[in-house]
Image (cartoon, rainbow, N blue to C red):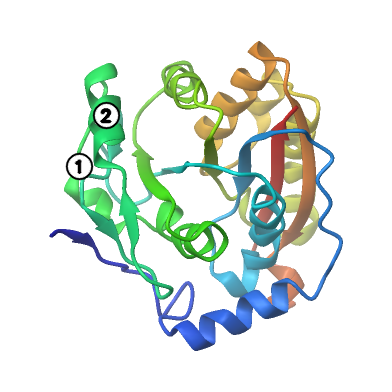
């Protein structure tokens, strides 16, 4: 049996279950998790170390967990490996400190057969934008079927077609992974990030032209899907790394949101 081993546990998040649970206990001290949507189709979450962006991501997962799903599909950008199209993970299981997730191989094969720009790139097994989501998925959804897609050089029109196919199944939750601006001063970062936040809130694709986000293609794709399907977007949280580090000279921005009806 093949297992996609965790590669950023111990750095981005604890590799020990007991220590990782402490993070979730801290995240969930806040009780303001209310779902105003009848159905949540997708969530937008950051992918930095849990100490910086875990609280922000947790708000989206916690609210989404109030719904029932059969499958979770996590989509994120490739940071280290350049390739054309997008890669679907083809291991049997996905490792997390909470226990392994079962990868839905039949569904993954279906995606590969459906879209010729999808493939399996083993180099994507070192990608953190999707891996940091796996413990959240395991914690909140247990033994749910899991699918990972890491995209490289691809336009948002193509990725939106994949999203459209995925979200035809109402029992599937789509997780779109992206951080916002990187390494500006706190003041400049907040100005740049506001462009992205307003693009999400107002479903304004044109505004994304001036948005700086490592997962911008994924954000554009889910907003394009939202426009086509008349879905609502709701911003949940925004912060920067300076909220934890107190270093306001070079910050990274993070946000989370839910998308549904």
Quarter of the image with the N terminus in it: bottom left
Residue 154 drawn at (x, y percent): 38, 26
Query: Which numbered disc covers residue 84?
Result: 2
Q: With 235 as the anchor, is 144 left or right in this view?
A: left
Give the residue at the far left of this rendering. Answer: 1
Q: Quadrant of the C terminus?
A: top right
Residue situated in front as seen by the camera: 175 or 243: 175
Q: Residue at x 78, y 53 (%)?
A: 237
Question: Does 200 sit above or below residue 61?
Answer: above
Left or right: 201 in relation to 256: right
Q: Quadrant of residue 166?
A: top left
Q: Taking the image as drawn, is residue 94 in sight? A: yes
- Which sits in the foreground, 242 or 254? 254
| Residue under pointer 1 | 121
Q: Secondary structure at mark 2?
A: loop
Query: At which x and y percent is residue 95?
Result: 32, 66
Foreground: 101 or 8?
101
The tag earlier along the polypeptide, 1 or 2, is 2
Task: Write down the quadrant of residue 26 in the picture.
Answer: bottom right
Q: Position of residue 92 (x, y in %)?
A: 21, 53
């Amino acid at each position: 049996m093949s297992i996609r081993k965790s590669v950023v546990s111990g750095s981005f998040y604890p590799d020990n279950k007991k220590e990782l649970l402490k993070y979730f206990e801290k995240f969930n001290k806040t009780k303001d998790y209310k779902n105003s949507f009848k159905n949540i189709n997708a969530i937008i979450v950051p992918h930095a170390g849990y100490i910086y962006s875990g609280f922000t991501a947790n708000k989206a997962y916690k609210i989404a967990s109030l719904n029932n799903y059969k499958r979770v599909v996590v989509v994120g950008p490739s940071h280290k490996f350049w390739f054309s199209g997008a890669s679907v993970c083809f291991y049997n299981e996905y490792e997390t400190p909470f226990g392994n997730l079962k990868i839905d191989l039949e569904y993954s094969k279906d995606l590969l057969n459906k879209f010729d720009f999808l493939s399996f790139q083993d180099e994507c097994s070192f990608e953190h934008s999707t891996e940091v989501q796996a413990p959240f998925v395991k914690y909140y959804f247990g033994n749910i079927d899991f699918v990972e897609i890491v995209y490289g050089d691809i336009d948002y029109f193509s990725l939106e077609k994949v999203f459209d196919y995925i979200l035809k199944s109402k029992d599937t939750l789509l997780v779109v992974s992206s951080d916002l601006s990187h390494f500006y001063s706190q003041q400049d970062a907040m100005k740049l990030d506001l462009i992205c936040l307003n693009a999400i809130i107002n479903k304004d694709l044109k505004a994304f032209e001036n948005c700086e986000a490592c997962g911008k293609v994924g954000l554009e794709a889910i907003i394009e899907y939202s426009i086509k399907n008349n879905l609502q977007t709701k911003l949940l949280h925004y912060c920067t790394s300076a909220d934890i580090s107190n270093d306001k000279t070079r910050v990274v921005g993070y946000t989370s949101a839910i998308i549904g009806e």
